Each structure stands twice: as structure tokens, then as C-alpha cells.
């Protein structure tokens, strides 16, 4: 029997790549979008879902269960970028980012767990970020929201072990997607004390995304995890130096690592 997979944020970028790859491998795949009617060309069954709206989550999950009778894999991929000096990012934008990157995935997990518990099986993959392992300048809110999802996964997976449900994180580095166009940018203000360093860092971040890896690598990583009997707690996918930066953070003194980051961002 083909496994039934739900991928949030499946209309573009990493989510779309994962969905199309899993389709080729014979899975039954449902993607989600806040506005699925905009993607009539999509190869996936796209359902309307906004991770910050629990009613849409419940409806989408129930639609899959009604049609397929089961739900085997959740890929919590929907997310949003955000940049800016923390001092200058409006509170509502910080809260909105956590609604999408942290509370949203938790609400989707809560919606699928009863069915997975009923089946006595299931796999939940949370797409986080290598940025979630460190506080990055002018990406602090994003780092915090993804880091929170990494940590809560560690706790969550222990709580659901008794039900034969697995949970893991996959943290991507920079990938060539449209995330830079879709994220919230605090404006570079003319009178801001952060104008020059933030402006320069913003250009550097956009360049990293533009020259990023092919999202197909993430699709293959997700497929490998689905095919693994006992998934690890954490996976990282990206450039060697991006993954190695996590190792360096563990072994270097804090201030040395901080200086390394500041040199990288030319601060």
C-alpha cells in the first residue's frame, strides 16, 4: 500500500520539490497552500491550508483521512523568512513569524496525531533550518523560531514513542528557492543606526539564497528519512561549511564563534 503524505507549503520551493519527488516514488501526496487555486498546474493534490488558522488545518487533515483512510507521513515544511535589526522589527511581525514557523507546525502535528495513534504508526518530519542552531545577525527572529521548533521536536518525539510514531528534524542550509522574495524585510531606514551593516548583510543573505543548493537535495533527504526504520533526531542538508558551522559552535568558545560569524557577515 502506498504511503499517504501531507506536505505543508507544497506549492513552491522545497515543498514542491519534495512532493513531486515523492510522487515519482509512488507515494500518495497532498500538498497545501493558502491559495491553491493559484497553482492549477501543480502536480500535487493541493489543499487549502493556512498554518496560522486551525480550522483550515483540521479541514485539510480530515479531507485526506476521508479520502485515503489513513495518513502516514507529515512533512511540516510551511515557513516564512524574516530579516531586520531586532530593535526595529515590529512586534506584530515577530509574532506572525512565530505563528508560521513555530505554532503553525505544532498545530498541524496536533491535528494528525489522533489518526497516527489510531493507525499505531506515523512519521512527522519538521523542516527547520541550520540558522536555528545559532543566533544570526539580522536573522535573529528567524533563528529563534526555527531553533524553537528544533528543541520542541526533541521533547515531542519522546512523548509519542509509545504510539509507534516517529518525529525528526531536517535542517536545510541555503537553497535556491523564492524564500527571499517572500520573507518579511524590515526596511533599511535612512536614519537607522543599523543602516549600513543591515543593508550589507541583507545583500549577502540574498546572494547566498540565489547561489544555494538545488531543492532536489532536500527531496532526496526526505525520501531517505521516510525509508529509514529508526530516523535520527536531527538531519542537516546543505553546504559543507554550513553544516560544519554547527560543529564549530559546539567546540569553539562562545566569543571566538561570535567573532567568526561577525567576520563572515563583515560586521
Image (tube, rainbow, N blue to C red):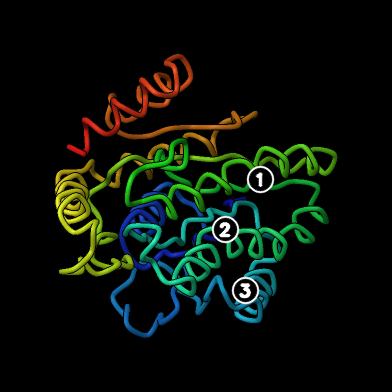
> Which residue carries the number 3 mark?
57
The local secondary structure at tag 3 comes to helix
Number of other residues with Cα within 10 Å of mark 1, as a class: few under 14, some 14 to 19, many 20 or more: few
Give whichever of discs 2 and 3 has the lower sequence position.
3
> Which residue carries the number 2 mark?
102
Q: Is residue 117 above or below residue 50?
A: above
CA–CA distance in space, label 2 to label 1: 9 Å
Question: Split into 4 quadrants, where in the image is the C terminus?
Answer: top left
The local secondary structure at tag 1 comes to helix
Residue at point 76%, 60% (across, down): 115
Find residue 35 and report its horizontal and vertical position in percent.
41, 82
Q: Nearer the viewer, residue 99 or 160?
A: 99
Say which mark, if any, is on residue 162: none
Q: Is residue 175 left or right of residue 95?
A: left
Q: Nearer the viewer, residue 180 or 78?
A: 180
* Disc 2 to disc 1: CB gap under 8 Å: yes
Find residue 137 and report its horizontal and vertical position in percent.
33, 45
Residue furthest top as drawn: 251
Amino acid at each position: 500500500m502506498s504511503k499517504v503524505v501531507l506536505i505543508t507549503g507544497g506549492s513552491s520551493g522545497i515543498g514542491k520539490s519534495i512532493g513531486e519527488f515523492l510522487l515519482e516514488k509512488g507515494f500518495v501526496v497532498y500538498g497545501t497552500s493558502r491559495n491553491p487555486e493559484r497553482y492549477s498546474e501543480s502536480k500535487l493534490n493541493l489543499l487549502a491550508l493556512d498554518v496560522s488558522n486551525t480550522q483550515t488545518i483540521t479541514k485539510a487533515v480530515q479531507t485526506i483521512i476521508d479520502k485515503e483512510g489513513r495518513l502516514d507521513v507529515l512533512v511540516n515544511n510551511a515557513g516564512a523568512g524574516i530579516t531586520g535589526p531586532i530593535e526595529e522589527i515590529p512586534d506584530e511581525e515577530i509574532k506572525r513569524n512565530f505563528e508560521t514557523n513555530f505554532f503553525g507546525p505544532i498545530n498541524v502535528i496536533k491535528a494528525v496525531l489522533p489518526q497516527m495513534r489510531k493507525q499505531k504508526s506515523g512519521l512527522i518530519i519538521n523542516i527547520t533550518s541550520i540558522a536555528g542552531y545559532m543566533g544570526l545577525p539580522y536573522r535573529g527572529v528567524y533563528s529563534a523560531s526555527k531553533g524553537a521548533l528544533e528543541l520542541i521536536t526533541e521533547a515531542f518525539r519522546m512523548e509519542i514513542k509509545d504510539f509507534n510514531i516517529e518525529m525528526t528534524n531536517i535542517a536545510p542550509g541555503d537553497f535556491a528557492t523564492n524564500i527571499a522574495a517572500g520573507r518579511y524585510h524590515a526596511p533599511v531606514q535612512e536614519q537607522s543606526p543599523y543602516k549600513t551593516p543591515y543593508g550589507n548583510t541583507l545583500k549577502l543573505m540574498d546572494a547566498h539564497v540565489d547561489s544555494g543548493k538545488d531543492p532536489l537535495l532536500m527531496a532526496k533527504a526526505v525520501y531517505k528519512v521516510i525509508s529509514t526504520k529508526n530516523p535520527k533526531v536531527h538531519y542537516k542538508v546543505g553546504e559543507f561549511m554550513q553544516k560544519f558551522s554547527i560543529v564549530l559552535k559546539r567546540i569553539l568558545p562562545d566569543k571566538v564563534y561570535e567573532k567568526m560569524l561577525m567576520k563572515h557577515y563583515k560586521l
